[in-house]
Image (cartoon, rainbow, N blue to C red):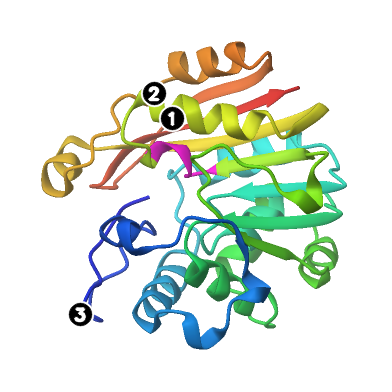
Amino acid sequence: MEDTTLENDTTVEAVGGWLKEAEGKIERGHRRLIDISLDALNPEYMAYFEDYRSRYFNDKLMPGQGVEEILVALREHGETPDRWIDLGAGVTTLFWSIGVRNPGQIIACDLVPEALSVLSQFKDSNEMPPCYSEAMAIIDTTQAEFDITRQRTWDYHVFDCHAPWTLAEYSDGANLITAIGCFGIAPDSAHYAKAFKAAAQNVRAGGRFIGADWVRSAAFVESEGHNNGYVSSELTKRCGDDCGLKLLECTHVPIQGDPNYDSVLVWAFSS
């Protein structure tokens, strides 16, 4: 996930989904989206996340970007969770839900309430972008299964997914937690490990923990400044070992034709 600066600029192209320059201005305490007034949301941030959603999760699915591998990992390792918590959800939880087999409760979590607001509005609409149908074909799921997930009542929580966390309403954890594009925006490997541990502590016994981390290209690191070259299978496996998890998959997927990313690491653990 990339960052961008939005302050006093509503024309910034939504390259990724990470408001790095706004992080110091965003409240980090836990809140529920339902308790935040629409009037309190930043319209520039709302426009950014809607642009990101319609730009990258709308048209035809681009092959060779790791999407196929992530969807397959979710389907093969995610089982049938009665509670699914998605960390760093942004606007993409509905898309990744295609890979999750018949989840019961769905809890989408992010630091930025505007991202979750855009996600909630899109989830409650009838819009069906072409890439969603193409994603369903990858794992041979049905529109009916997707509609069941979409029509459930979702819960949205605002908090820092890189810091230690618990959700009072779900204090017994979840049997599926996902972190797709969430941990790789940590400043270094130590913060990555801290975020990983915080999430792992909320995975129920016998549950699954699945994620993906995009590795930035040298050109993107030079132009933008954030270097996440620490992302590696060795780091992720070590984090899993430190948390007492069993490795199910850790796959390095080269990315084709993207100037900003070289690869994505797709991983899955069981508790």
Disc 3 on helix, strand or loop?
loop
Write the residue at 60% across / 11% down. 241
Residue 134 lies, in percent from the top left, at 61, 60
Judge by depth and name the residue closer to the eye, 82 or 109: 109
Q: CA distance from mark 1 to mark 2?
A: 5 Å
Position of residue 174 relative to residue 19, above or below, is above
Q: CA distance from mark 3 to mark 2?
A: 33 Å
> Would you name the residue on which mark 2 appears?
190
CB-based contact (under 8 Å), mark 1 and mark 2: yes
The crowding category of the residue bearing disc 3, from other C-alpha atoms within 10 Å (few below 14, some 14 to 19, many at least 20), is few
Write the residue at 30% across / 62% down. 22
Residue 12 lies, in percent from the top left, at 23, 73
> Would you name the residue on which mark 1 appears?
192
Image quarter for residue 261?
Answer: top left
> Would you name the residue on which mark 3 appears?
8
Write the residue at 50% across / 49% down. 160
Image quarter for residue 5?
Answer: bottom left
Q: Is residue 5 left or right of residue 269?
A: left
Position of residue 236 relative to residue 119, above or below, is above
Residue 18 lies, in percent from the top left, at 37, 56
Q: CA distance from mark 1 to mark 3?
A: 31 Å
> What type is the residue that disc 1 sits on?
Tyr
Can residue 110 be seen?
yes
> What type is the residue that disc 3 sits on?
Asn
Q: Is residue 200 left or right of residue 8?
A: right
* Sequence-first disc among 3 and 2: 3
- Magenta includes 95? no
**What stretch of residues is rendered in magenta?**
180-184
